[in-house]
């Protein structure tokens, strides 16, 4: 089992066992400008959020980043923006004070890694 498969399984388990989490399944392909893992994620999940929506990743939130030109916003955690670069899967969590994406400490290989990491802390 690859690390990515393990993260997918962990996320599925969290969604099944945590009553404070909400998700909607997707019925189609979303985010054509996203990387392959992110596209697959949004073709599976239309939305994943905490019940109070302090953390939310959703296909309808896919838009241009407020903080980094040329990047794509896929959601938010409180006041931080969750962004990716077009065609890539690496996830960055930013608030706009960073000098660049490569200078942020909150970097995850995929959306699955990010969600599993943050949801385990919440």
Image (tube, rainbow, N blue to C red):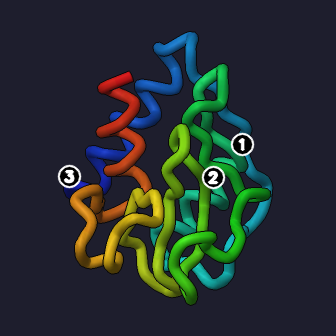
Numbered tag placed on residue 1 in the rendering: 3
Q: In this view, does 91 lie above or below 118?
A: below
Marks 1 and 3 in Cβ contact (< 8 Å):
no
Image quarter of the C terminus? top left
Give the residue displayed 50% in from the left and 66% down from the top.
83
Gap in angstroms between the C-alphas marked 1 and 2: 6 Å
Residue sticking out furthest to the top: 19
User: Earlier along the polypeptide chain: callout 2 or callout 3?
Assistant: 3
Q: In this view, does 112 lie above or below 56?
A: below
Front residue of 39 and 64: 64
Describe residue 69's horizontal placement relative to residue 23 as left or right. Answer: left
Give the residue displayed 49% in from the left and 50% down from the top.
80
Q: Tell which tag, 1 or 3, sits nearer the viewer.
A: 1
Marks 1 and 2 in Cβ contact (< 8 Å):
yes
Gap in angstroms between the C-alphas marked 1 and 3: 24 Å
At which x and y percent is residue 16? 52, 20
Give the residue displayed 63% in from the left and 52% down from the top.
44
At which x and y percent is residue 26? 74, 50
Q: Mark 2 points at which residue?
A: 44
Numbered tag placed on residue 112 in the rendering: none
User: Earlier along the polypeptide chain: callout 1 or callout 3?
Assistant: 3
Could you tell me which secondary element the residue under label 3 belongs to?
A: loop
Could you tell me which secondary element the residue under label 1 belongs to?
A: strand
Q: Residues within 10 Å of mark 1 (few under 14, many from 20)?
A: few
Describe residue 66's horizontal placement relative to residue 9 as left or right. Answer: right
Q: Is residue 67 above or below residue 42?
A: below
Q: Name the residue under label 1.
A: 25
Front residue of 40 and 61: 61
Describe residue 105's horizontal placement relative to residue 35 as left or right. Answer: left
User: Earlier along the polypeptide chain: callout 1 or callout 2?
Assistant: 1
């Amino acid at each position: 089992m690859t690390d990515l498969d393990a993260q997918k399984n962990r996320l599925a388990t969290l969604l099944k066992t945590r009553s404070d989490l909400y998700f909607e399944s997707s019925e189609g392909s979303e985010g054509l400008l996203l990387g392959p893992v992110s596209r697959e994620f949004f073709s599976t999940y239309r939305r994943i959020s905490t019940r109070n929506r302090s953390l939310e990743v959703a296909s309808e939130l896919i838009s241009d980043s407020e903080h980094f030109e040329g990047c794509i916003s896929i959601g938010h955690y409180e006041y931080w923006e969750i962004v990716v670069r077009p065609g890539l899967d690496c996830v960055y969590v930013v608030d706009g004070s960073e000098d660049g994406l490569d200078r942020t400490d909150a970097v995850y290989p995929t959306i699955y890694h990010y969600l599993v990491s943050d949801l385990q802390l919440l």
